[in-house]
Structure formats: structure tokens, C-alpha cells
Amino acid sequence: MNSWMTNIVVGAAFGAAIATAIAVFGGASSPDVIMVQEAEEVVEEPAITEEELALYIEVYRSMQADRNLKIDDAVQAKGTTVAEFRGIERRVQTQERLIKRVRESLLEQAKENASSLVERGVAVRP
């Protein structure tokens, strides 16, 4: 789990514990404590569609192909905003199988680029 996700989970758990302690020491009855805990449930993110995953991969592939390309320009070229892209990115990074697919795609492109450089005589194989 990423450190920012760990901080969110730990922060939510700490907040729930504090709310429960305040409710108990403040003289609230048991049902009140249960209601406080239920109110702090985490909302589940929607699933990633194949189109969103393809967009995510395309943006990173374009940035890999052109190291000078900034995220703003890369997402704009794909018809989206940075905020929408970051939302997709956040959801992708919570699923290990999707992270693996992205890595494989980017590695495939890197290998293709390396082979192309060798064929053109720009780089030498080790």
C-alpha cells in the first residue's frame, strides 16, 4: 500500500477511534456510538473501464515516447483534463493487476524503442 493510502486509512481509523471515545466519555449511549462509526464508512471507487485504462496507458506511452511532453499537454491531446486523468490514475493504482498491465505496456514500448535504436545504429546491444 502506498504511503498516502496508508495515511488515509490510519487517519480514518484514528478519527473513528477519537469519535467513539468522545461519544463514550461524553455520555452517549451505545446506539449513538454505532451511528458515529457507520457514518465514517469509506465510499468505494467505481471500477475502471477498459476505455479509462486505455486512456491512462496512452497518456503514459505518449509521455514515454516524448520525454519533453508535460502531463497537461498529454491529457489535453487525449481529450481529457488533468483532474479527470488523476481520478483514473488514483483508481488504477489501487488495483495491482491494472498496475501490472500498465507496466507491461510501457515495458513493451521501451523494448520496441530500444530495438529501433539498435537497428538504426544509435545504440548498441550489451
Image: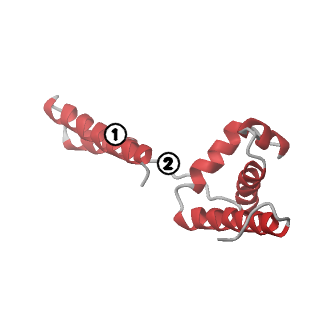
Q: Quadrant of the N terminus?
A: bottom left
Q: Residue at x 65, y 58 (%)?
A: 48
Estimate how packed mark 2 is, as few (under 14), some (14 to 19) or many (20 or more) residues with alpha carbons within 10 Å. few
Q: Residue at x 30, y 37 (%)?
A: 15
Q: CA distance from mark 1 to mark 2?
A: 15 Å
Residue 125 placement: quadrant: bottom right
Q: Is residue 53 above or below residue 40?
A: below
Would you say residue 105 is visible in this rendering?
Answer: yes
Residue 23: x %, y % from top left: 21, 33
Q: Quadrant of the C terminus?
A: bottom right
Estimate how packed mark 1 is, as few (under 14), some (14 to 19) or many (20 or more) residues with alpha carbons within 10 Å. few
Report the disc number at residue 87.
none
Q: In the rendered image, which residue does mark 1 sit on?
A: 11
Q: Is residue 109 above or below residue 88?
A: below
Please state which amino acid type lies under the numbered disc 1.
Gly
Q: Nearer the viewer, residue 20 or 101?
A: 101
Would you say residue 41 is visible in this rendering?
Answer: no
Residue 86: x %, y % from top left: 64, 43
Q: Nearer the viewer, residue 60 or 85?
A: 60
Q: Earlier in the sequence, mark 1 or mark 2?
A: 1
Q: Nearer the viewer, residue 7 or 113?
A: 113
Report the disc number at residue 43.
2
Q: Residue at x 58, y 52 (%)?
A: 91
Residue 71: x %, y % from top left: 71, 40
Residue 76 placement: quadrant: top right
Q: Residue at x 72, y 67 (%)?
A: 124
Disc 1 versus disc 2: nearer the observer: 1
Residue 83: x %, y % from top left: 67, 37
Please state which amino acid type lies under the numbered disc 2.
Val
